[in-house]
Amino acid sequence: MIYFLKTNQLNNQNKPTLFFYLIFILVLSPLLSSAQQSDGNAIKIYSDSSHQNIQIDYEPQGMVYNLLVQVSDSSGRTIFLDNRYKFSGSYQKSFDMKNQKKGIYFVQIIGDDKHINKKIELK
Amino acid sequence: MINFIIRCFLLVVLATAFNANGQTLKSIVYDFDGLDIGQTDLPEGDYQLNDLNYSIAANPLGESDMLGDRVLQLNLNAGNGTFGRGISRFIEFDPSADVFHFYFYNPIINSADATVEVALSEDDDQSDFFSIGTDDVWVKSIVIPRNAGWQLISVPLNTLIDSNPGGNGVFDAAFTQAKGMLLFVEFNFTQNSPDNAVYYIDMIAFAEGAMPTGTTILDIPHPVLTDKCPLGAFQQKASGNQHLVPSAVEGLFPTIQKKIKYVNWFLQFAMDGSTTANVFPGNEVKTLLTNGYTPVITWEPLYTGYARLDPVQPRLSNIINGEFDTYIDAFADTLKSYNDTVIIRFMHEFEGDWYPWSITHNNQDPSNYITAFRKVVDRFRARGATKVKWMWCTNADYAPYEAYNWIVPAYPGDNYVDIIATDIYNNHFPVNSPWWMSFKYKAIESYYYLTKYFPQKTLFICEEGCRERASSENATSQTKADWLSQMDKELKADFTKVRALIFFDAITENDWRINSTSLALTSMETNIWNDDYYFESEMTAGIFNNKDESELMVYQSGNYLNFKAAKLISNENILIELFGMEGKKISSKTIKPIMNTVETKINIDGLATGNYLVRVSNNDFKRVVKAIVK
């Protein structure tokens, strides 16, 4: 299972109970979503129903001359990387994780002057 | 059959000749030139992982021609860390010949060797992004010892190992043949000691074979000054006034009277707001020709009264279908009347997305472009306008960046192209962003493909421009004046097949002018205008037995300038004089050639660093070349 880590909006497919939600907000959230939160409201990271793909949805504000989306595992190995030039519109990408180990993965979204870091856990 | 065998043999000979020196720069991942000290956000897709951070630093061992004054400082705090760059570029790799290079400085003050795994990925499923389930990752682990100086690390691609079960297990990145992009380059460091480590890295690049260098790995290749790279210019003048461009440019340098060779200007099909093709060159062509200049007419199927991509604009199909035949014939008749060489740059920058003749706006099919280009050339020839030379001009950037947009399949053919060209700008996107790119970084891929696939054609840079720094940028970073100086060195070292440099001397979204500032103008004068490399001069006639095979080199080695002139036409004594840039003579010597070759050393002990002039002469010839003392 993959928790999506959109800061203040939950994915309907994986909506936890209120108890777990509160635990998540108070305890896990500071651990799981790191530093910079610019455009955080425009990001969704979640699994598909088969739990074999990660889906990244991102809505940049306006045209991004260079958009880099990178996902790595805890050892620093790149799992997914997409480098786009002159990107505009909605960024939506799904990629295969069925052969990957469970654990923490790191997501970076770098767009011109924005740098967003997220963590996701594949359970 | 015999014809086929002969063609194959010639191809083999050609390929062998091209690879003869085995040192051709192919693509630069990063050279960091011109970036700000302390800058952490690099252009075009950098990223870091784990316990490593990086920033732009001054070269800790001092500036060199190869590395410049900016490098990337890597701070490895503990454990593991990665510096990477998303590439997402099509690069025509030959794994059997190509080598990945980078310069690395592991200072003695560090406590251990550096252990780094180089990782390259390529796009086997042609999705244009990397996914570990479907694409290869090629790696090699390298241990780099501590050293007092920079080390050049060279990794042949055929020594890399595929570390990822995904992908097809073949290093097959390329534009063509259903291959994909090079997706990323990573340096994955492992810490070997409990102490923090500081490393420096620079000039990350791919080459055919060894990295092209000069005397040392920190020198760029020695300039070979036997050929010329004459200058030209475009200036914004009222229609019909392009004959005024030479005096305007040459007037910027009143102390040294020289002539540019080319004048470039733009003519659209219609410039009166209509959609009727009715524009023809006028008397400015004749005036330029009479005064010894070569016109370069950038001829654009475009109506200036409408937006470039307005549906009303001509498309390639309109040309192919014959809708402009009458106009094209009349244009040909006009040029035929001049009875002298005029260059037409037709439908330039076709791999961009900003013109209606671009590949992307014409069914994404380069064959349409080729058909239209050939049709126009054929009509000119049918009208007898045979003195027109046809320029096929690319752009250094692709938009969109798609395999169908590659320049090579859009080549109209040797019978239809006389001159190949590219346009090079140090610009920034979006405007006001702090991006800054060296000439070599920006131009090398375009140059590589043009010279590799069309070596038989004359190569121009038909538009060249460098922006000025914005007021918001760091004032200590490379200036336009410095950029021009660096371009001058690199043109003569890594771009030796360029046979014309035409400045875009105008203000558009940036100030590209030669004299945008007094510093830029001074640099232009010092580095380019004072250098005979950029001028065709009758004074040089007679010095060499065979211009194409002769050699003239001046380069520094320690406290000496090494001078060599080979294949001289006679063994008559040669006077070699060293001057300061202000014209003051510093030393001279007379040498008698032996077997038509002169080779000597000029002592420069005690000379200040900077530019100098070396004049070579006898009773019949005189030639001046620039020398740089470091």
Image (cartoon, coloured by chain):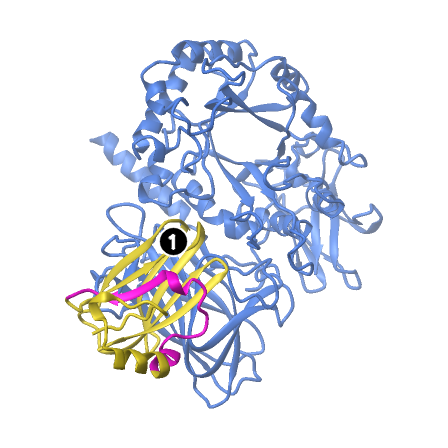
Q: Nearer the viewer, residue B305 or B339?
A: B305
Left or right: where does residue B34 sit relative to residue B583? Answer: left
- As drawn, the residue found furthest toward the right would be B584
Is residue B140 placed above or below B412 in the rendered structure? Answer: below
Q: Nearer the viewer, residue B20 or B443?
A: B443
Question: What segment carries the magenta color?
Answer: A28-49
- As drawn, the residue found furthest toward the front would be A18
Can you say which quadrant of the picture contains the N terminus of chain B?
top left
Q: Position of residue B15 (x, y in %)?
A: 36, 45
Is residue B281 placed above or below B511 in the rendered structure? Answer: above
Q: Nearer the viewer, residue A23 or B597?
A: A23
Q: Quadrant of residue B403?
A: top left
Q: Position of residue B571 (x, y in %)?
A: 68, 41
The residue sitting at 54% across, 84% down in the picture is: B110
Left or right: where does residue B164 sit relative to residue A76? Answer: left
Residue with the mark numbered 1: A84
- Amino acid type at circle 1 is Arg
The residue sitting at 73% across, 33% down in the picture is: B620
- In the figure, the shade used to draw chain B is blue
Give the number of marks: 1
Q: Position of residue B389 (x, y in %)?
A: 49, 23
- In the figure, the shade used to draw chain A is yellow
